[in-house]
Amino acid sequence: MTGYFLYAFIYLVAAVIAVPIAKRLGLGSVLGYLIAGLVIGPIFGLVGDETVAIQHFAEFGVVMMLFLVGLELEPRSLWAMKSKLMGLGGLQLALTTAFITGVALLLEQPFSIALTIGLIFALSSTAIVLQTLQEKGLQKTEGGKSAFSVLLFQDIAVIPMLALIPLLAIPELVAAGGEHGAAESHDSFNLVEGLAPWASGLVIISSIAFLTIGGHYLSRPLFKFVAASGLREIFTATALMLIIGIAALMGLVGLSPALGAFLAGVVLANSEFRHELEANIEPFKGLLLGLFFITVGAGINFSVLSENPMLIAGLTVAVMLVKAIVLFIIALIFKIKGTNKWLFTLSLAQAGEFGFVLLSFASQNYVLPNDIISVLSLVVAISMFLTPGLFILFDKAIIPRYKNAKSQRDEDVIDEKGTVVIAGIGRFGQIINRLLAANDVKTVVLDIRSEQIDLFRRFGNKAYFGDASKPDILHTAGAHEASLLVIAIDDRETAAEMVKYAKHAFPNVKVLARAFDRGHGYRLRQLGADFVVSETYHSALEMGAEALRSLNIHPFQVERQKMAYKNIESQQNDVLYHAWVDDASGERVDNNYLKLFSELESLIEDALKADLHDKHSKMRGWTPPPKGYAEKLAPDEKPDNAKK
């Protein structure tokens, strides 16, 4: 028992040290886990043979991840993805398998071995890619969604792969390991082993049907029963029981536990308990995935690597290059453009964790000899180890290149002048421009994002491509003759520089600026902005008011409280601003500022409570009309409810 505690402590210490450092250096958590495993395994030898056993346990993190992915996908959404699933996923799998099988045949490998190698390397790492896309906020981009479609198809394709691999068994390996294989077969838990093909298929179909129908009709009463106990830990136990049971059932019928978990997640996607399931499983998923990545790093066998360094390095580069070329071609075929094309290509260019599963399965079914398996395992592990580096390449090289390319578009010739110059025509600037245009105010609209300008023009509006932070562009746009300069861009530093320049170059022009938060707003004010508004202030206040109205609080009371909040905020804003300016530490949040901010919170709370009980509030932003006002109106002026 003490040994297990020591190993657990070593793994946790490695993760606690390596992952925060990797995150701080911009390397991502996945690379941090891999480095931690490399340090405690091959480098210092703190862990050993138990790594393989722990890795099998940690693979359950992949199962949990796919269950959570399934929870996010309703069956209707999955059906809507069918073209991408079959198109992107099917084409990637077929082409990659064909290319790698062909290369293996050129290296004089038998067809069965070559095809198995092709299938293994056609798969990418669901765990690393999805985790990294989520961390970097790329899962909603076109490239991220396309990568997800391919990964999803690959996970589904594992089932026919597991069915195909036993048919590729090599007679010599079967003869050499017959007795040992029979013993393992006797001890294994597999309901379909030894059954006729039709009976095996019937068992598998019945299991999937039970999972689908049972998950839909039996899960809700179960969760209601458990939720009625009011014990959170029992709900957590139920969630774990559900996933472990599904994984065990899929294993018993010879299917992928990960695919079964994904299918169960899709079935439960419409359940009212979905969010509770996510909240309970997420911590376990994160820890087990981290443990899985550590075992991948710890499992790198330096002795095999030192014996065949050029072979393993060459195979790793070749596999990643072939996959990248195939993915790039598919991106061109499906017209994935710009940075999304490169994100799609680079994110899936590695082998995946299911490669270890297929290697183990191929070994058990006498398809691959052990010497080939040891080499292929290293290629899979090293390619996974290099994947975070590909994301760093995307961040540091690809994105800046495309940003520079966009900025190289020739700036438009600004041939008009206006009363108001608007810098930035995103969702914030569009609303401002719409209000001004509705009042026949002439505006000159500038934006550095060419796609935003093109979209704005498609709706019949006039806008110019140009960098409003450049002084010559502002002069050409007539900022020196305008009455207002509206800075509606979402880049904090650029906005601050623009305010500073505008107040120096155009002292008679009023500058209205969009702020990211309170601190940014104070900085813009310090630089001379005449009016500053935080981009979320009014929308959040309005949402809060709607929340109160939704709870049946009287609209008059809601509006009075909104006005109370605004008044107190306005009164104390100057005090907070001067405290922010006077702070000599440079941090702008010294003890005096924090004290004043706490006082502001207390004043707002007191004002709202006082207004709640004050039937004669002095807040006149919204007051109820006098009693009997409806009777004094002409019939056609009365509200509909007053006419009844």
Image (tube, helix red, strand yellow):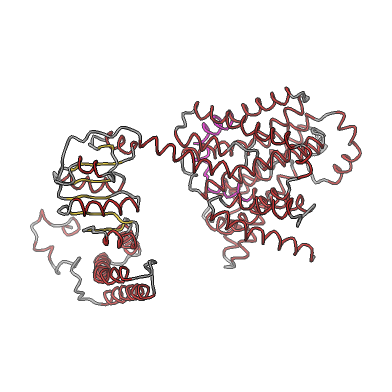
Decide which of 10, 627 is in the foreground and name it. Answer: 10
Q: Is 1 located above or below residue 614 in the figure?
A: above
**Which residue shows up at 13% across the image and 62% down it?**
630
| Image quadrant in which the C terminus is located | bottom left
Residue 242 visible within the image: no
Side of 308 where 149 appears, left or right: left
Where are the magenta residues, as a range?
A: 64-90
Q: Residue furthest right?
A: 179
Instruction: Please check the rendered image and state whether residue 44 is part of the magenta-colored stretch, yes or no.
Output: no
Decide which of 207, 118 is in the foreground and name it. Answer: 118
Q: Is 223 located above or below residue 312 in the figure?
A: below
Residue 264 visible within the image: yes
Residue 158 picture quarter: top right
Instruction: Please check the rendered image and state whether residue 88 is part of the magenta-colored stretch, yes or no.
Output: yes
Give percent across and percent down for residue 597.
34, 72
Decide which of 398, 584 is in the foreground and name it. Answer: 584
| Image quadrant in which the N terminus is located | bottom right
